[in-house]
Every structure is written in structure tokens, then in C-alpha cells.
Amino acid sequence: MRPITKLKLTEEQVAELELIIKQDKRYRVRNRANAILYKSKNYKVDEITKMLGVKPQTVYVWLREFGKEGIKSLYEKKGKGRKSILKIEDSEEIKALVINQPSLRIANAKIRETLNIYIHNVTLSRFLKKNQIQL
């Protein structure tokens, strides 16, 4: 793999990267934006790794992806992370089991018994809130 010596950015890209660094809530996105901006200012990869606390290979991957996809490479791709145990398709069935239950713990026990799905009470609480289901 050939090392990336220079990275030229347009003024719009620089402005967008600076905005991402200031406003985006996601740490990883801000970190990637910083790496791209530092490289465009002719910092060496070793310097960038020390400032951001990542491995050189990680910075090279970020730079390569930015070269291919641009700004959208800074964001996580869909499908990354752990898949949800509770599916949206199950929400009607879960709603029927949960409705009129005196507590979340009892509702969770009912779900475990009926659907054979083992989840934490906090997970169930988040699912109910996300799908606007009231106990």
C-alpha cells in the first residue's frame, strides 16, 4: 500500500469538517474528521495517531475511505453494531402482552414466558418508549 503523502481539500470540505468537529455528537465521527483535517494540513500519520490515540493503520483506513467516499465515509454504515433482540414486527404482540400489566418486571416475565425472549428490563423499557407503548 502506497502511503498517502498529501490530501487536498476544497474550502467546502474544510468548512464541513470543521462543522462536524464542533457540532457532531458522535465521538468517532469527530475523530475521523479531525484526522482528515490534520492530514490536509500536512501532519504526518504518526503525529495524527499520537494526537487522536489511534493506530496508524486506522488513520490510513480513514484516509483511504475518505478518498473513495468523501464526507459520508466519516459516518457509521448501516448494519454495524449489535442487532436488536426485539423486532418491530413483534411490537403488536409485545403490546398485547404488556398492556395493563402492573409493572415492567411482570410484563417482562410475560414476554419471556410467551415469546421465549430473554431481555433486560431496561431493554424492554427502551423498546416500549421507542415504539410509544404505555404500560
Image: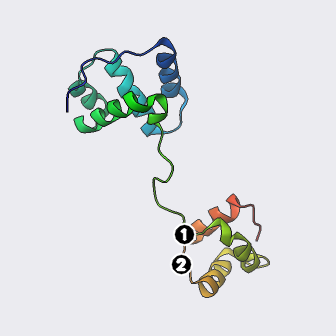
Image color mode: rainbow
Residues 72 and 135: in front is 72
Q: Is residue 31 above or below residue 96?
A: above
Indicate the secondary structure of the residue bearing disc 2.
loop
- Going from N to C along the chain, the mark reached first, 1 or 2, is 1
Residue 67 position by quadrant: top left
- The amino acid sitting under disc 2 is Tyr
Q: Is residue 46 left or right of residue 22?
A: left
Count neighbours of disc 2 (C-alpha within 10 A) and say few if under 14, some if 14 to 19, many if 20 or more.
some
Indicate the secondary structure of the residue bearing disc 1.
loop
Marking on residue 121: none
Residue 46's spot in the image, x, y percent?
Answer: 21, 27
Q: CA distance from mark 1 to mark 2?
A: 9 Å
The answer to whether any part of residue 55 appears in the image is: no
Residue 103's spot in the image, x, y percent?
Answer: 70, 76
Q: Quadrant of the C terminus?
A: bottom right
Residue 101's spot in the image, x, y percent?
Answer: 75, 79
Q: Residue at x 46, y 60 (%)?
A: 82
Q: Residue at x 78, y 76 (%)?
A: 99
Q: Residue at x 29, y 33 (%)?
A: 59
What residue occupies the far bottom of the structure in this picture? 113
Q: Is residue 123 left or right of residue 13?
A: right
Marking on residue 118: 2
The answer to whether any part of residue 24 appears in the image is: yes
Count neighbours of disc 1 (C-alpha within 10 A) and say few if under 14, some if 14 to 19, many if 20 or more.
few
- The amino acid sitting under disc 1 is Ile
Residue 121 position by quadrant: bottom right
Marking on residue 85: 1
Disc 1 to disc 2: CB gap under 8 Å? no
Of circles 1 and 2, which is in front? 1
Residues 100 and 4: in front is 4
